Image: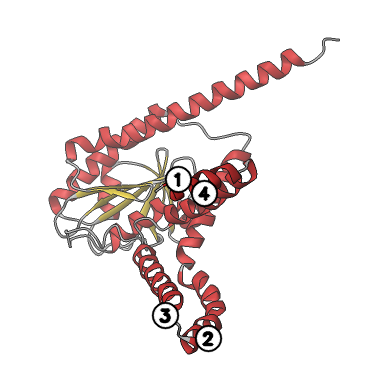
């Protein structure tokens, strides 16, 4: 016991600031990787890779197996090239998040949220979703927030019409030309219909006990993973209403509470923009005060 304590004290004494920085950097990299693959199919794959690596390490360390050790040392470089291929969707999603964060930080003029306009839009969306739910007409309504969805608008039919419950019901009426895709709403305008959304590759829907969630729910979750948009889904099978936001899905939202739930998301965005505007104003004020007077 005394020898163990002495070794621990010896190791602690040898730790320098450079060693701590090194450990923090390595830990941060592993933390970011685990964060990117959380709730994705790669999470299960990563467990299998770690299990195989540990098993191979134990076999080559505890048992003298020359042929097996040669095989491992020969194939290990090939595995390093295979890892980026296996985790391509997660790497792409992580780079997209990094790009959105960077572009958000570099923006000088940021769009502001007009809550008065948004409240009217959300009221119409909630009314339409409630009626679509009663008739069990499937629907996917995507509400743009700060990040532009123009890329996905170009995959559908441009509309540029004011949001009304009747318009949304007509768009998602079965067998109409626009009912299969998503409708994108910007402020109080339905900018496009029949839009193609990216499908989610995460394991959120796979782990759900409910099997009524199909392609629309995967598309709603997918657009919420690659943007800050909010997607409202009406199930064609059960008529239940769901909301997807930031890679998470809220199921079985009551029709009479849908408007308040959506409004809470936009109020949170408005508060963040207000804090950012105050911070920018204070920064500008301090800069002007520090400038030498002529």
Front of the two marks 1 and 3? 1
Q: Secondary structure at mark 2?
A: helix
How far is mark 4 from mark 1, CA to CA? Answer: 29 Å
Front of the two marks 4 and 1? 1
Task: Give the mark nearest the N terminus, 4 or 1.
Answer: 1
Name the disc covering residue 28, or none.
4
Q: Residues within 10 Å of mark 3 (few under 14, many from 20)?
A: few
Q: Is residue 113 above or below residue 175?
A: above
Q: Which residue is mark 1?
A: 5
How far is mark 1 from mark 3, CA to CA? Answer: 30 Å
Q: Quadrant of the C terminus?
A: top right
Please state if 266 lies on the left or on the right of 79 as rendered: left
Q: How is the image coloured?
A: secondary structure
Task: Give the mark nearest the N terminus, 3 or 4.
Answer: 4
Q: Secondary structure at mark 3?
A: loop
Name the disc covering residue 63, or none.
3
Please state if 236 lies on the left or on the right of 164 as rendered: left
Task: Give the mark nearest the N terminus, 1 or 3.
Answer: 1
Q: Residues within 10 Å of mark 1 (few under 14, many from 20)?
A: few
Front of the two marks 3 and 4? 3
Residue 179 shows up from this direction: no
Q: Residue 205 in the image: state x and y as whole percent.
A: 27, 59
Q: Secondary structure at mark 1?
A: helix
Q: Which residue is mark 2?
A: 70
Task: Give the mark nearest the N terminus, 2 or 1.
Answer: 1
Which residue is painted at 82% across and 10% down in the image?
A: 293
Which residue is painted at 17% across and 36% down in the image?
A: 256
Q: From this viewpoint, which residue is outermost toward the bottom?
A: 67
């Amino acid at each position: 016991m005394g020898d163990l304590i002495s070794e621990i004290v010896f190791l602690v004494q040898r730790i320098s600031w450079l060693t701590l920085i090194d450990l923090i950097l390595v830990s941060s990299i592993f933390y970011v990787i685990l964060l990117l693959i959380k709730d994705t199919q790669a999470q299960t794959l990563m467990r299998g890779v770690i299990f195989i690596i540990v098993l191979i390490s134990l076999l080559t360390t505890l048992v003298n197996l020359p042929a097996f050790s040669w095989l491992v040392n020969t194939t290990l470089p090939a595995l390093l090239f295979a890892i980026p291929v296996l985790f391509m969707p997660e790497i792409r999603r992580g780079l997209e998040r990094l790009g959105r964060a960077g572009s958000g930080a570099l923006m000088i003029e940021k769009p502001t949220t007009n809550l008065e306009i948004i409240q009217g839009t959300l009221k119409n969306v909630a009314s339409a979703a409630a009626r679509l739910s009663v008739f069990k007409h499937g629907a996917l309504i995507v509400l743009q927030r700060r990040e532009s969805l123009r890329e996905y608008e170009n995959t559908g039919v441009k509309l540029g019409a004011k949001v009304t419950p009747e318009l949304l019901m007509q768009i998602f009426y079965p067998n109409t030309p626009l009912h299969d895709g998503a409708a994108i709403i910007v402020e109080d305008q339905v900018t496009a219909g029949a839009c193609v959304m990216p499908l989610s590759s995460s394991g959120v829907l796979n782990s759900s006990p409910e099997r009524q969630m199909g392609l629309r729910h995967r598309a709603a979750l997918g657009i919420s993973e690659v943007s800050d948009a909010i997607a409202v889904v009406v199930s064609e099978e059960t008529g239940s209403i769901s909301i997807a936001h930031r890679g998470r899905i809220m199921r079985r939202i009551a029709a009479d509470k849908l408007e308040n739930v959506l409004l809470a998301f936009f109020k949170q965005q408005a508060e963040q923009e207000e804090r950012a505007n105050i911070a920018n104003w204070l920064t500008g004020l301090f800069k002007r005060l520090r400038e030498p007077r002529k």
